[in-house]
Image (cartoon, rainbow, N blue to C red):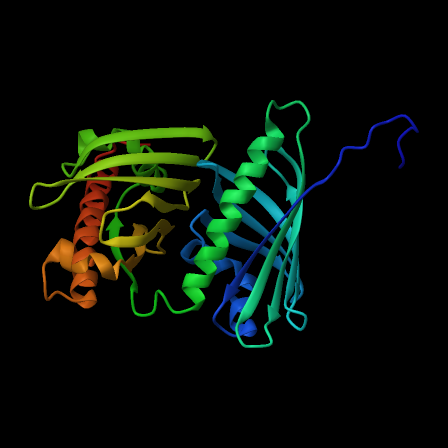
């Protein structure tokens, strides 16, 4: 429907960002097309899920930071593997964004390598002060960060540096009680000896900012900050934004399932990436990436098991729920 002749039509804002990647276009396109790998590749992306997919058109839900704030939205994407293009548009935006669409364009360069163009077209919510400036800053920051991360990842910067591991505990208690213990992280300093301070905010339902001081076995204190996506009684997914010196990536997930036998199976899963340049500084000269993986696996596993065992004790004693 057209507006009246005197009605002012808002102007669509447009931006373009481009980068050159020293890799083949098919390899680059594959990363852009697989949204499930984005939390490992793109710094701003906290979590990503494919809701529907028919082989060409998909609906996805993303959780990401924008100007440091956690946001979530639902988008529709059209994937063209032959042309190596992905057109996207937000179905459900979050304020101050009124609408957002754009395109990934991947092209082979004549001399080798690949050009990646990322475009955005958006409209701000009209009654939110400074919405246009806020969105422009977020698009600028995230686009540059995503393209730089894409380049590093595809060019092999993380080869051999990543590891995934998990720990599982069976709990003979109510599943909601176990979930409550993990969800209410603000109470952890009282119940977890390795946690000395917690700052927990939940400005949007199920989307938490968690800053935490933990004490290592050697007595040193480490501060981390994470964004957590909480799915009621099912799982809590998170990504660390402030990392210890030895890591360039840490994502994780608490998963809760009721077994046929009755107990609740709770699994803590971690994916980490070692900062190879920091291995000697943190662990000492002569230590390898493999040593660093083992060290991180031991430290994170110990903390996860400590948390799970406290959750087990609380749930089995009926202290939660």
Residue that appears at 6% across and 45% down: 218
User: Where's residue 114, x and y in %?
Assistant: 55, 69
Please give the name of the residue rendered at 38% of the width and 29% of the height, measured from the top-left corner: 201
Q: Is residue 89 visible?
A: no
51, above or below 29, in the image: above
Name above or below for residue 229 compared with residue 39.
Answer: above
Which of the two residues, 314 or 7, is positioned nearer the viewer here? Answer: 7
Which of the 4 image quarters holds residue 240? top left
Q: Quadrant of the N terminus?
A: top right
Residue at image location 17% in from the left, 51% down from the top: 302
Task: Estimate the x, y position of residue 43 in percent, counting from the top left.
Answer: 42, 50
In the image, is residue 49 above or below residue 164?
Answer: above
Q: Position of residue 17 (x, y in %)?
A: 58, 52
Q: Residue furthest bottom?
A: 111
Q: Quadrant of the C terminus?
A: top left
| Number of numbered discs on residues | 0
Q: Position of residue 83 (x, y in %)?
A: 68, 70
């Amino acid at each position: 429907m057209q507006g009246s002749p005197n009605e002012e039509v808002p102007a669509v804002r447009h931006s373009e960002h481009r980068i050159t990647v020293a890799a083949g276009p098919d390899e680059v396109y594959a990363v852009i097309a697989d949204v499930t790998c984005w939390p490992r590749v793109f710094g701003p992306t906290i979590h990503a899920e494919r809701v529907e997919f028919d082989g060409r058109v998909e609906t996805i839900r993303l959780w990401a930071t924008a100007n440091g704030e956690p946001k979530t939205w639902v988008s529709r994407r059209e994937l063209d593997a032959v042309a190596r293009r992905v057109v996207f548009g937000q179905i459900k935006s979050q304020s101050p964004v009124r609408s957002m669409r754009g395109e990934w364009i991947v092209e082979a360069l004549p001399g080798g390598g690949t050009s990646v163009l990322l475009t955005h077209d958006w409209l701000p919510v009209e009654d939110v002060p400074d919405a246009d400036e806020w969105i422009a800053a977020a698009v600028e920051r995230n686009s540059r960060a995503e393209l730089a991360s894409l380049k590093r990842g595809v060019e092999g910067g993380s080869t051999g540096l990543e590891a995934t591991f998990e720990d599982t505990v069976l709990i003979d208690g109510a599943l909601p009680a176990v979930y409550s213990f993990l969800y209410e992280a603000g109470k952890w300093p009282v119940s977890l000896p390795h946690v000395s301070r917690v700052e927990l905010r939940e400005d949007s339902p199920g989307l938490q900012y968690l800053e935490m001081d933990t004490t290592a076995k050697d007595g040193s204190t480490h501060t981390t900050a994470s964004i957590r996506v909480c799915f009621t009684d099912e799982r809590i997914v998170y990504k660390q934004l402030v990392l210890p010196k030895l890591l360039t990536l840490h994502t994780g997930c608490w998963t809760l399932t009721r077994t046929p036998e009755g107990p609740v199976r709770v699994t803590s899963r971690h994916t980490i990436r070692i900062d190879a340049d920091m291995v000697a500084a943190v662990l000492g000269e002569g230590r390898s990436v493999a040593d660093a993986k083992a060290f991180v696996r031991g430290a994170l596993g110990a903390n996860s098991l400590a948390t799970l065992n406290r959750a087990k004790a609380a749930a089995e004693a009926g202290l939660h729920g």
